Amino acid sequence: MSGDVLQVLAAGLASGSVRVVDLSQTLSPETVVIGLPEPFAPSAPFSIETLSRYDDKGPAWYWNNIALGEHTGTHFDAPIHWITGQGLPDNATDTIPAQKLMAPACVLNFTAECVVDPGFLLTVPHVEAWEAAHGRIPAGAWVLLRSGWSKRTGADFLNFGETGPQSPGPDVSCVRFLVEERDVAGFGTETVGTDAGAAHSFDPPFPCHGMMHGAGKFGLASLANLDQLPPTGAILITPPLKIAGGSGSPCRVLALIAG
Ligand code: 23J
Ligand code: MN
């Protein structure tokens, strides 16, 4: 049975009827990292230094040293990232079961709303309206907020205003609903982190980190190409690097889509 499924998948990949969509941003020293206010520790930007490039440091080989924060660019948030998830079993990048790193995705498109309001908050009624059109979010599925944010570059990506960063994300009730009523795999977003830019002022603050990770659920940040995904039916492949005790890692997020 499962052999048939994989044969169908292999044939689909070979013929192109199953397509692989890359949901990752390119990592470079220009990759914008989250900016936390003092006294919080800043995350290092991505840096890269050539060791050798077919030269006297290595005549036949090219390679680089890289350095980066775990939460840089397109990345995966593990439950241990937040204090609420610190005591959970299998909560870090090296211990999350591999079986949990492939799951279906529901893509909620609120791009138009985010153009009008860059601080757009996803609410339970928004999710219910999406479900009325596309069906109930199944347990174990990713919920991805498609906002168009990945098209932003430079300062517009963090979008700092007078009250702090302005960027879309879920409100407190929506996160609680997705965790408690839908038992999602996690929440994914095109923005720098899973929480809305204004989430520092929510009650509780940073609900998408606190409540998702407290329930053993994951996050995906700085996703791209969500406009290439159907509302339902895509399968995401989201393995973080196997960092011992890691809180997350840059991730080459891939989506399989049919048709
Ligand atoms: C640390 C502190 C606050 C936030 C974050 C990290 C992230 O968004 C992240 O990348 O997990 S909001
Ligand atoms: Mn993160």
Image (tube, helix red, strand yellow):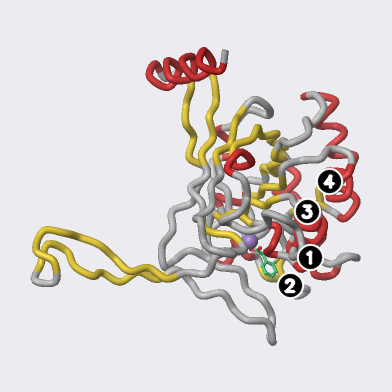
Ligand 2 appears in which quadrant?
Answer: bottom right
Q: Which residue is mark 1?
A: 198
The CA span between labels 1 and 4 is: 20 Å
The CA span between labels 3 and 2 is: 23 Å
Disc 2 Cβ-to-ligand 1 distance below 8 Å: no
Disc 4 Cβ-to-ligand 1 distance below 8 Å: no
The CA span between labels 3 and 1 is: 17 Å
**Vertical placement of 50 versus 104: above or below?**
below
Horizontal and vertical percent position of residue 27: 44, 58
Q: Are marks 4 and 3 in contact (CB under 8 Å)?
A: yes
Amino acid type for the residue under numbered disc 4 = Val
Q: Judge from the rendering whether residue 88 lies leftward or rightward of residue 253; answer left or right.
A: right
Residue at screen point 63% across, 65% down? 158
Please identify, in this view, whether the residue under mark 2 or under mark 4 is nearer the observer: 4
Amino acid type for the residue under numbered disc 2 = Gly
**Vertical placement of 95 versus 23: above or below?**
below
Q: Name the outermost residue toward the bottom.
A: 39
Q: Which residue is mark 3?
A: 212
Horizontal and vertical percent position of residue 145: 70, 44
Q: Are marks 1 and 2 in contact (CB under 8 Å)?
A: yes
Q: Which residue is mark 2?
A: 164
Q: Are marks 3 and 2 in contact (CB under 8 Å)?
A: no
The CA span between labels 2 and 4 is: 27 Å
Amino acid type for the residue under numbered disc 3 = Met
The CA span between labels 1 and 2 is: 7 Å
Q: Earlier in the sequence, mark 4 or mark 3?
A: 4
Q: Earlier in the sequence, mark 1 or mark 2?
A: 2
Mark number, residue 179: 4
Residue at screen point 68% across, 57% down? 91
**Dot 3, how many residues are within 10 Å of its Cα: few (below 14), some (14-19), or many (20+)?**
many
